[in-house]
């Protein structure tokens, strides 16, 4: 969202962001939603919101939760905008009953990073397809599913009620949807959002002037890594997030390093949160959570391959950044990954989501050293064609202009 915001401004457009929480507190163009609607607070709304917020934690979204945010349409920020783009709407800062109100008098584009909008609770339903016809008895809200479900589990399964509420809200809203892969488009076309005004695919963008090929030996020297030998990289926001599959990558490298003293080094980026298992790897370096894009790019460039071990995805930004850096990707055969990683061309696709298959995929890569250089060049070429942030922003601008033109025409007819 911030990448698009900054690139839009660079291209001469005005952009403002309103969020529940911000890690960019120094940016005056990023507003906190509670500050924007503060003048509309009342004792009655506060009491109802507190009650609704508690019910939301128990059974899922509720029309009284975050009640004051229904006044977003009355704020100066909403009145200022020509078009409203929505992003991730779960997290306790937004009332979904805003959708009909927000989209009644201005065009609304909803960019979906995951499948939460389509389900009764889950952002990533894994193998469950109940969201297509009506959620009920959610397998991710019982037993071990509660340990991996995103967002965090509610106390009782309210998925049937929530799915129906979302369906009704969408039927009374005027929405355009943006997705980042053709795989996600297929999911939407089979869901309660299938009848929106338009369904559009625009990939995530990457700043190709930062994430770019850098001489491997030079990158490793700057990072204090051995300049020779193979290096495999894993990166995500949390090492302990089940969906990102670090536990599989870790086990696979333990097996590979146990076979051969000349086995590859394993380097990682990401917070240690929720990961407390002892490290048994022989050749390992953890860089922690890396916020600086320049250092991220250096780490991508230092690696021979990037392990994208996600078990459910919309489109992983890390894989795109790796390819932009000229580093091939090894990924599981799921979701949009075969769309992004062309097997044998920009990396390798692992047929099943288990440790043995991952070991096989890594060894397949290591045993085909003669094509590593060509793969790296193919990755950069694909990034230039598909992930250029400037080009992706232009696609958004074109879409906005088209939507605004159609909206004005319909408004004039009325």
Image (spheres, grey):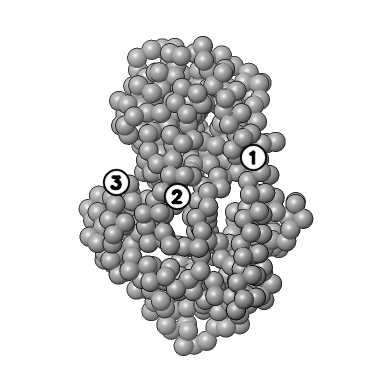
Q: Residue furthest front?
A: 413
Q: Residues within 10 Å of mark 1 (few under 14, many from 20)?
A: many
Rendered residue at 32%/26% (across/down): 357
Name the residue tied to disc 3.
127
For discs 1 and 2, the disc positioned in front in the rendered view: 2
Please, is residue 82 above or below residue 178 in the view? below
Q: CA distance from mark 1 to mark 3?
A: 32 Å
**Can residue 162 be seen at all in this image of the molecule?**
no
Q: CA distance from mark 3 to mark 2?
A: 17 Å
Rendered-image quadrant of the N terminus: bottom right
- Residue placed most toward the observer, 370 or 18: 370
Q: Position of residue 246 (x, y in %)?
A: 40, 36
Q: Residues within 10 Å of mark 3 (few under 14, many from 20)?
A: few
- Residue placed most toward the observer, 242 or 163: 163
Q: CA distance from mark 1 to mark 2?
A: 21 Å
Q: Position of residue 92 (x, y in %)?
A: 45, 66
Task: Find residue 383 and report its image quarter.
Answer: top right
Q: Marks 1 and 2: CB-CB under 8 Å?
A: no
- Residue placed most toward the observer, 153 or 131: 131
Compared across the picture, whether 330 is left or right of 412 comes to left
Q: Marks 1 and 3: CB-CB under 8 Å?
A: no
Secondary structure, mark 1, is loop
Q: Residue furthest right?
A: 12
Rendered-image quadrant of the C terminus: bottom right
Q: Position of residue 367 (x, y in %)?
A: 43, 13
Name the residue tied to disc 1.
388
Q: Which mark is residue 150?
A: none
């Amino acid at each position: 969202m911030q990448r698009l915001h900054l690139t839009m401004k660079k291209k001469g457009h005005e952009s403002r962001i309103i969020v529940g929480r911000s890690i960019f507190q120094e940016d005056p163009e990023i507003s906190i939603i509670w500050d924007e609607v503060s003048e509309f607070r009342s004792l009655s709304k506060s009491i109802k919101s507190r009650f609704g917020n508690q019910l939301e934690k128990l059974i899922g979204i509720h029309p009284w939760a975050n009640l004051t945010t229904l006044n977003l349409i009355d704020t100066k920020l909403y009145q200022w905008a020509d078009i409203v783009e929505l992003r991730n709407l779960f997290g306790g800062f937004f009332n979904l009953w805003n959708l009909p109100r927000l989209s009644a008098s201005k065009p609304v584009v909803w960019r979906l990073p995951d499948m939460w909008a389509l389900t009764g609770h889950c952002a990533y339903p894994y193998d469950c397809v109940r969201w297509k016809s009506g959620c009920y008895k959610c397998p991710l809200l019982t037993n071990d599913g509660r340990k991996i479900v995103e967002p965090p589990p509610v106390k009782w399964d309210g998925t049937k009620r929530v799915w129906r509420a979302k369906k009704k809200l969408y039927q009374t809203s005027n929405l355009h949807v943006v997705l980042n892969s053709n795989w996600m488009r297929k999911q939407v076309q089979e869901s309660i959002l299938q009848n929106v005004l338009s369904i559009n695919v625009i990939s995530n963008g990457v700043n190709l002037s930062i994430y770019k090929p850098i001489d491997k030996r030079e990158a490793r020297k700057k990072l204090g890594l051995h300049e020779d030998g193979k290096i495999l990289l894993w990166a995500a926001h949390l090492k302990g997030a089940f969906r990102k599959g670090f536990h599989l990558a870790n086990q696979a490298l333990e097996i590979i390093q146990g076979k051969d003293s000349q086995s590859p080094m394993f380097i990682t980026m990401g917070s240690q949160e929720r990961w407390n298992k002892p490290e048994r790897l022989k050749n390992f370096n953890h860089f922690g959570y890396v916020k600086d894009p320049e250092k991220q790019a250096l780490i991508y460039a230092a690696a021979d391959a990037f392990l994208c071990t996600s078990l459910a995805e919309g489109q992983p930004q890390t894989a795109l950044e790796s390819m932009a850096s000229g580093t091939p990707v090894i990924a599981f055969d799921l979701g949009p990954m075969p769309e992004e990683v062309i097997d044998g061309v920009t990396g390798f696709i692992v047929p099943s989501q288990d440790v043995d298959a991952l070991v096989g995929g890594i060894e397949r890569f290591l045993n085909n050293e003669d094509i590593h250089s060509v793969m790296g060049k193919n990755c950069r070429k694909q990034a230039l064609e598909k992930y250029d942030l400037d080009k992706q922003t232009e696609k958004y601008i074109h879409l906005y202009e088209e939507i605004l033109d159609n909206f004005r025409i319909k408004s004039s007819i009325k």
